[in-house]
Amino acid sequence: MPETSLLTDDVRALIGIEHPLEPARVTLRSVRRSMEVYFGAPQPADYAEGDPVPGYAIAGLDSDGDSGRPEPPRLLPNSLLISNDWHFERPLRLGEAFSRVYVVTNISERFGGRFGYSIDVRSETRFIDAAGEVAARSGSTLTQYDAAAARASEEA
Amino acid sequence: MAVSFAGLQEGDELPALELEPRLGQVIRYLALGWVFPEFFFDPEAAKAQGMPGTLVPGPLKLGLLYRCVAEWLGPSGFVREVRAAHRRPDLTGKPITIAGRIARLYQEDGSRRADLELAIINAEGQPSVRGFAVVQFFESA
């Protein structure tokens, strides 16, 4: 366990900074590919421009042109996805274009427990429609920990 | 048959969705994001990382929870929110069951909604994921 908290002012200052990502558009191809992921095989997906599409589409949008996404702050050597989520204010529609921003929404630390000292980084991508409203969000929380230190602590 | 808000009761169970995520499905998921950690598709790389085999990625399991809810809801509404808290890994090629129940029926902002408790149960009967979803019905309050 570190002698002092790793959550310095510099780290906390990362919370809330909006990083613009490349825009994304709901295409029939991305909807079909997303559905195929979750069904394990191609699915009938004949949507017309403007039709509501299943929320799976967000998985395709979230991965579309992610080169502008910064790495979350790396404070400890190991990391593990502990939770993730999708939120929709309304159904997404075929042909819709979204601007996207990536935000670290929270960073917190835990002392003790399964991973020893650990840090949770919660981040999300926001999908903003032509009216400037957040239509959907895709979020995740990664816990960072030091596996070697946790093992040593267990053995002590 | 389409579900109707009026016909639902708190405690009602969703039809269980029994699945067996395959390696091919995992590869499709990785291709969607164009990110390919070897331990997700190469059994030897997975073993080198201390895993018994290739795992089903957490974000893929979130989408499977979404699928369970969306198939139950049908055209009656849309899924506003789905969340997954990952408790233990699931191996590819192993059966899982997605279970759900209605925790709360309510009205908010003029719309009818339901909160759902969800879980992915592995072949040993243990929950590998605890989940939660909110659905909104198209019929207005």
Image (spheres, coloured by chain):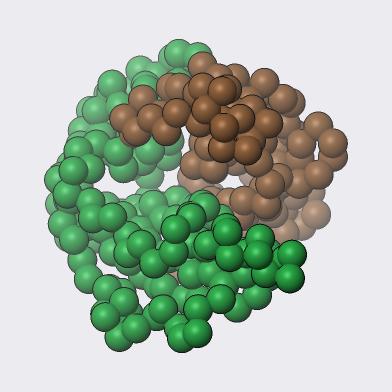
Chain colours: A green, B brown
Horizontal side of A111 relative to B104 (left or right) equals left
At 76% from the left and 57% from the top, the residue drawn is B10
Q: Position of residue A42 (x, y in %)?
A: 45, 13
Report the front residue among A3 and A68. A3
Q: Position of residue A89 (x, y in %)?
A: 38, 56
Q: Position of residue B39 (x, y in %)?
A: 51, 31
Q: Quadrant of residue A53 in the image?
A: top left
Q: Position of residue A99 (x, y in %)?
A: 17, 51
Q: Quadrant of residue A63 in the image?
A: top left
Q: Residue furthest right?
A: B125
Residue B92, placed above or below residue A143: above
Horizontal side of A41 relative to A155 (left or right) equals left
Residue A153, placed above or below residue A64: below
Horizontal side of A12 relative to A133 (left or right) equals right
Q: Does residue A35 appear in this view?
A: no
At 18% from the left and 43% from the top, the residue drawn is A67
Q: Does residue A30 appear in this view?
A: yes
At 48% from the left and 67% from the top, the residue drawn is A120
At 74% from the left and 26% from the top, the residue drawn is B95
Horizontal side of B54 relative to B40 (left or right) equals right
Count of marks overlaid on the render: 0
The N terminus of chain A, quarter of image: bottom right
The C terminus of chain A, quarter of image: bottom right
Report the front residue among B84 and B10. B84
Residue A23, placed above or below residue B106: above
